[in-house]
Every structure is written in C-alpha cells, then in structure tokens.
Amino acid sequence: MCTWRNSSYELDTFAPSILHKLAFLEVPIHSLAAYVVVFKTPARMEAVKWMMFTMHICGAYLDLFLSALSTQFFLLPAAAGHSQGLYTYLGIPVKWQAYMFISAICLAGVSILGFFESRYNALVKGKGTSVLKDKRRLLYIGGHYIYAFVFILPITFTPPDQIYGMWYVRQMLPCVPQEVFNHPDFFIYAIDITLLTWIIGIAAFVITSECIYFFTRIVLYLSSTKAKSQKTYKLQLHFFIALTIQISIPLAVVIAPIGYIVFAFVASHFDQALNNISLNMMAFHGLISSAVMLTVHEPYRQAVMKMFCYTYIYKTLHQASVHTEGTIVVLSSNRA
C-alpha cells in the first residue's frame, strides 16, 4: 500500500522544523544529567556511576543524532532517503549517516544491557568488581559494543547500483512525487530489505532477550530478600525500582513508532507522514530518559533541587524559623 496526501507532515522539512529546535532544549538537560551523574552520585551508588553515565551518554547521543546531527528522512519500508543536519553540512555521505543511526540505536540497547549485567553481577553473584578487572565480563560487554559497530557493516559496504536502485524504489513507491527522488543527497541503502531486516531483527532479539534474562534474575533475587540486611535490601530494591522506571518510561514512548516501523517492513506499507512522525517520537527517547533519571533517583533529585531552588527555599524557611523562635523567646522573657 502506498499513501501520499500532499501534506506538510510528509515533507522533508517537517522533522527539522521540530527536531532542530528540540536540540536547544536537549543539550542543557543532557549536560545537566551528565554533570549530576558524574559529580553528584553518592558513595553508596559509586559502583553504578559509570554504567549510569554510559547509558546516559548513549541515549543522549541517539537523541542529538536524530534532532541535530542527522535528522532522517527515510521512505520506509524502502531502505532509501536522505539526511539533514550537521553531518550533512560537514559532507558525511548519507550511507554512513544511516550506518551511524542504526549503530546508535544498537549502542543504546547495549548500554542498557551492560547496566543490567552489572546489577546482576553485583547483586545475584555478589561480585561488585569493576568490569575492567574481570576478563570474562570485559570480553562479554566489550564484544557487544564491538558488535554494535560492526553488525550493519555488510549492508553499508554493499550498496546497490543507485540508478537501478532509484528505478526499483520508484516502482515500489509509485505514489511518491518525483521531486523527492530528485534530492541531491537521496540514497538507496538497500534494495532487498530481507537481509537488512534479518540483521536488525536478530540484533534486537538477542539484546532484548539478554536484558530480560538479567532483569528477571534480579527481580527473583530481590523478591527472595537475600540481601545482607533489611536496610541494604531496601536500598537495593528502591534503586532497582527507580532504574526500571527510568528505562521503562522512555521505552514506552518508542514502542509505538518501533511497532509501526516493523509493521511497515512486514506489510510493505508506505505512509510518509507516519514515517516522519515515528522518527520524531524516537528523538524524544533520551530527553525523557534524562528527565526521568533526574526525577526518580532521590540523590539526583535532591542535587537538582539544591542547585536550582532548594537552597533558597531552605534558607528562607530557616530564617523565618529563627525569627519566629527568637520572638517567642523574647515574649517568654518579658512574661517572666
């Protein structure tokens, strides 16, 4: 099915008109979140600080990639389109921008996997050592990060003939106006999307399955109250609940666009308005993740409050309290 409405939502200017402005909001919020994680993480959370930072950086990069560095205009389910953003201005070829986009999504998933693996290793196995000091863990996590960079390279290094590819996509999507194909940066990433779908699908399935495994083992451990003390157990439970909320809320935001993209590939359904809206929604993932992280984790929430308003409010209330207590003392002295 091929649908084109001649709507502004279908134009390549739709996403930049929103996402380029969004970047001005994302940069300070992501920077604040990074600062808080690095400098305001309390000693009791020291073991998770750098995993939290890595997860935040991967999510923030994916955000900024879509909103400012390489805003995507893809004709899904065809693996074709072009990009607009800083990378385009710097002359980076569209095929490498597409490669970086897919790799950035995989990196965000691997960073979440790395955090769950770290929590599993510390809680369930009782080994709180750094991943850098454990060769097996380093090989496991490092291998996943390397995989995120290389798994899509076979498609990137074998692009189709662009003249034939243009004809093929034109036959596949007859409703798309010719001016879309006339864009100087328009690129056909792949003709046969079967291999591309399998490569991305396998990566998504493997990483998701591993995350679910570690998540389930941690939940079973915490539900069995095997912690050393009730206080330790409560700290571990509260932190894990906060972490789950931090990851779940942003994921809930991207479930719908990812679901539509999968449907578009499986059903060969084309609707550029929904393509653009889906990519726009995905660009909010990291921003929401940073905001939730600064809200649900008590140490980070308190740090932000102290930085912006808590100190002023505390001083004001404290001065009022001292003044009130002083008045009561004076009145009591006069009565005496």
Image (cartoon, rainbow, N blue to C red):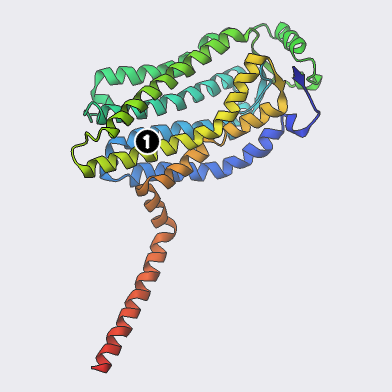
The x, y position of residue 32, in whole percent, is 45, 46
Quadrant of residue 82 within the rendered picture: top right
Residue appearing at x 60%, y 19% in the figure: 262
Quadrant of residue 317 within the rendered picture: bottom left
**SS at circle 1:** helix
On the rendered structure, is 160 left or right of 59?
right
Residue appearing at x 37%, y 53% in the figure: 302
Which residue bears the numbered disc 1?
A: 52
* Residue 210 shows up from this direction: yes
On the rendered structure, is 214 left or right of 94?
left
The x, y position of residue 55, in whole percent, is 41, 32
Q: Is residue 78 above or below residue 68?
A: above
Q: Is residue 314 above or below residue 213?
A: below
Q: Tag 1: residue type?
A: Met
The x, y position of residue 287, in whole percent, is 52, 39
Q: Residue furthest bottom?
A: 335
The C terminus - image quarter = bottom left
Residue appearing at x 30%, y 29% in the figure: 220
Q: Is residue 80 above or below residue 294?
A: above
Residue appearing at x 49%, y 45% in the figure: 29
